[in-house]
Image (cartoon, helix red, strand yellow):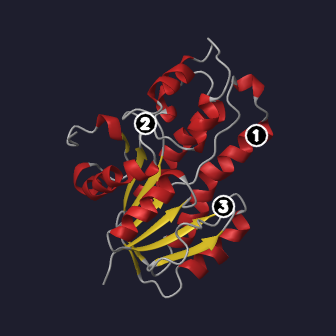
Amino acid sequence: MSERVFITGVSSGIGAGLAAYYLRAGWEVLGCSRREPSHLIGQNNFHFVSCDLSRFDQVPAAMEKLFEGTVRCDLAVLNSGVLSPFGDMQSVTIEQCQQVMAVNVWSNKAILDWLLPSPIVLRQVVTISSGAAVNGNRGWNAYSISKAALNMLTLLYAREAPETHFTALAPGLVDTAMQEKLCNLPEDSRFPTLETLRSKRGTADMPDGDQLAPRLAEVFTELPTQVESGEFVDIRKLPWLKG
């Protein structure tokens, strides 16, 4: 029986890269995203449902459809995320903050609240966090808050479901549509992290989702034996990861 992974946000970026990697490795891949991943549709062992995860009422039906007949999930990668308008906290509205929290935090609660009570044996959950959760750099506003909240959400579920291993993982810099947007913002001395991103883009320090996927998969495999369930870790600071 092939191993099975569930991945959110499979239409682009990290999610798309991971889905393609696990399919090549012979895994069964269950994926969801708002947009259809045309490059994956039709591949053997790929199952997809479209779901706007910010619409919490849609999540149970989508999960029912995607997991129909499934009794075991070896790995769930909760990857979907959105960026708030970049700038100072005072420049973003509460409504914009709520939209970011809906996708980056509460959609994961909706998913886990369906998965954990189900008969499905769920062995491992990795929530995709960010260094922004802890570094407090100016400009990241609601995105930073959402990822910090995601870290705590991950820890709380780990305490509630000890039979499943949980990790909140910061994957480092990844060249995604989010980076495209950030790197095209005007230069602004108030936000030095933007210049850092521009300097890293196009280098080995900022791989794209396809390039990063094998390294992430390696990390996912090691997490249950290397990290206490519920912890937040940054891939750039893992002492046991070579290269």
- Measured along the vertical axis of the image, is residue 231 above or below residue 162? above
Q: Residue at x 52, y 80 (%)?
A: 67
Res 50 quadrant in image: bottom right
- Measured along the vertical axis of the image, is residue 28 above or below residue 107? below
Front position in the image: 47 or 52: 47
Rendered location of residue 116, percent (x, y):
48, 70
Left or right: where does residue 80 sit relative to residue 168?
A: right
Q: Give the mark nearer the N terminus: 1 vs 2.
A: 1
Given the image, on which type of amino acid does mark 3 rest? Leu
| Circle 1: element type | helix
The mark lying in front, picked from 1 and 2, is 2
Cβ atoms under marks 1 and 2 closer than 8 Å: no
Cβ atoms under marks 3 and 1 closer than 8 Å: no
Q: Give the mark nearer the N terminus: 3 vs 2.
A: 3
Kindly identify which residue carries mark 3: 53
Rendered location of residue 36, percent (x, y):
63, 67
Q: Residues within 10 Å of mark 2 (few under 14, many from 20)?
A: many
Rendered location of residue 111, percent (x, y):
57, 65
Left or right: where does residue 106 sit relative to residue 10?
A: right
Mark 3 to mark 1 CA distance (whole Å): 16 Å
Mark 1 to mark 2 CA distance (whole Å): 27 Å
Front position in the image: 231 or 177: 177
Q: Residues within 10 Å of mark 1 (few under 14, many from 20)?
A: some
| Circle 2: element type | loop
Mark 3 to mark 2 CA distance (whole Å): 27 Å
Q: Residue at x 47, y 49 (%)?
A: 128
Kindly identify which residue carries mark 2: 206
Kindly identify which residue carries mark 1: 96
Given the image, on which type of amino acid does mark 2 rest? Met
Given the image, on which type of amino acid does mark 1 rest? Gln
Q: Give the mark nearer the N terminus: 3 vs 1.
A: 3
Q: Residue at x 61, y 73 (%)?
A: 49
